[in-house]
Every structure is written in C-alpha cells, then in structure tokens.
Amino acid sequence: DTGVSQDPRHKITKRGQNVTFRCDPISEHNRLYWYRQTLGQGPEFLTYFQNEAQLEKSRLLSDRFSAERPKGSFSTLEIQRTEQGDSAMYLCASSYPINTEAFFGQGTRLTVV
Amino acid sequence: AQSVTQLDSHVSVSEGTPVLLRCNYSSSYSPSLFWYVQHPNKGLQLLLKYTSAATLVKGINGFEAEFKKSETSFHLTKPSAHMSDAAEYFCVVSERPDDMRFGAGTRLTVKP
C-alpha cells in the first residue's frame, strides 16, 4: 500500500491555461476528497466522491473547476482558464465509509503566473 | 455550523520542554475531532482522533489530546518536545465524514 498518490507534485502555468491534476487513492477506500490549501491557512473542502458519485461540492468550486472519478478509483481535478487566485496546494484524501479518518496525499502545488 | 479556532498561529519551545497547542471548536452536534501534522513537503498525517470514546486520546509520537466538552476545547500536548516535532499542526472538527473543517494551523518551532 503506497498511500494516496498525487500527480504532478508541482505545476506552473500561465494565466488562462487549463490544468488537470490526478489523485490515486488507497485502493480499498471508496471515499475521495479534494481540498485546497493556501499559504498560512488550513485545507478547505472542495468536493467529495463516494465511489464514482460526486456527492458534494463546495461553493469554492466555481464553474471553472470540475472533478471526476469515472470508475470509482482515481480522480481528476481540472481547472479551466486559470487565474492567479487559483495558486494553492491542492490536496487529495481518501477514507473508508465507516472509519472517518482521511489519509492525505502530498498535494499538487499550483502556481499561476 | 461547525468551526474550529487554533488560538496560536506560532508556538516556540525548547527541546525537551512540554508542548501545548490550543484548539477550540464549535459544533451543534457531538463531533469527531482530529489533530493532523504537516511536515514540509509531506502530506498531512493523522496524529490522533476523538470519536466520543475516552476523553483523553493518545496519539502517535507521544502526543495526546483531551476533549473538554464544557470548554469546547481539544488541546494537543506532549510532555517533551523533540526537534523532529517541528511542523505545522491542524485541529479538525467533523460532524460527518465528508465535512472536515480545518483550523488555520499552528506552526511549532523547536529550539535546540
């Protein structure tokens, strides 16, 4: 078990470009979460999947953001027309349904220039 | 609505002295409470969790936390700080599994 894996670890993009991040959860976990963490703040919830179903989306997730988990395994988070305010660490976590503990990946640091 | 406040943004201690990181929470229900640690360039790691069992919770690396409902607090302590404890610590409140609210974090510095 290698834990939660995120790719890439770092991404620098120009404003207006689209970016996509990938998260591979722990294999037997059916819940997957995306969080965003800006400098000096704690992680903020973005969205949550149970298997392939996206069950909740935060108001932070504007129309430019979309997340998928097509087969209930890995997930992707896409940001379209990136803005400088999107610069942050994007964290993925996964958990069992009964055990509420979430296991986090190392995150993808996005810098929009 | 649930929320969590970490009372200190930065705590500095000397190696071998006690650590106290303070956390107050607000919740309409009986929440689960967690402490996570984040080392530079590493993922968030769970230190300990409270889920309505014993009020004194023991975690990894010698950390423990006490749930005090009357004070709505869940402070993190360690009797003797080690250099490797230097990191960012997050208190988390959760009323349901898909809704974890993180505090702003406390940066712990350990001086030799």
Image (cartoon, coloured by chain):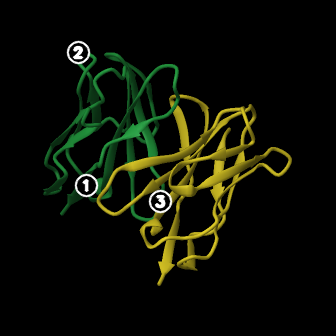
Chain colours: A green, B yellow
- Residues A14 and A94: in front is A94
- Chain letter, disc 3 residue: A
Q: Is residue B48 above or below residue A33?
A: below
Q: Position of residue A34 (x, y in %)?
A: 36, 37
Q: Which residue is mark 2?
A: A71
- Are discs 3 and 2 located on one and the same chain? yes
- Chain letter, disc 2 residue: A
On residue A41, the disc is 3
- Three-letter code for the amino acid on which mark 1 is drawn: Arg
Question: In terms of image quadrants, where is residue A79?
Answer: top left
First in residue order: circle 2 vs circle 1: 2
Q: Which residue is mark 1?
A: A109
Q: Is residue B50 above or below residue B61?
A: above
Question: Among all residues in the image, which is located at the extreme right?
Answer: B70
Q: Is residue B82 above or below residue A112?
A: below
- Residues B69 and B79: in front is B79
Question: Among all residues in the image, which is located at the extreme bottom?
Answer: B112
- Are discs 1 and 3 located on one and the same chain? yes
Identify the residue shown where x is 38% and y is 47%: A36
Q: CA distance from mark 3 to mark 2?
A: 32 Å
Q: Secondary structure at mark 2?
A: loop
First in residue order: circle 1 vs circle 3: 3
- Three-letter code for the amino acid on which mark 2 is drawn: Lys
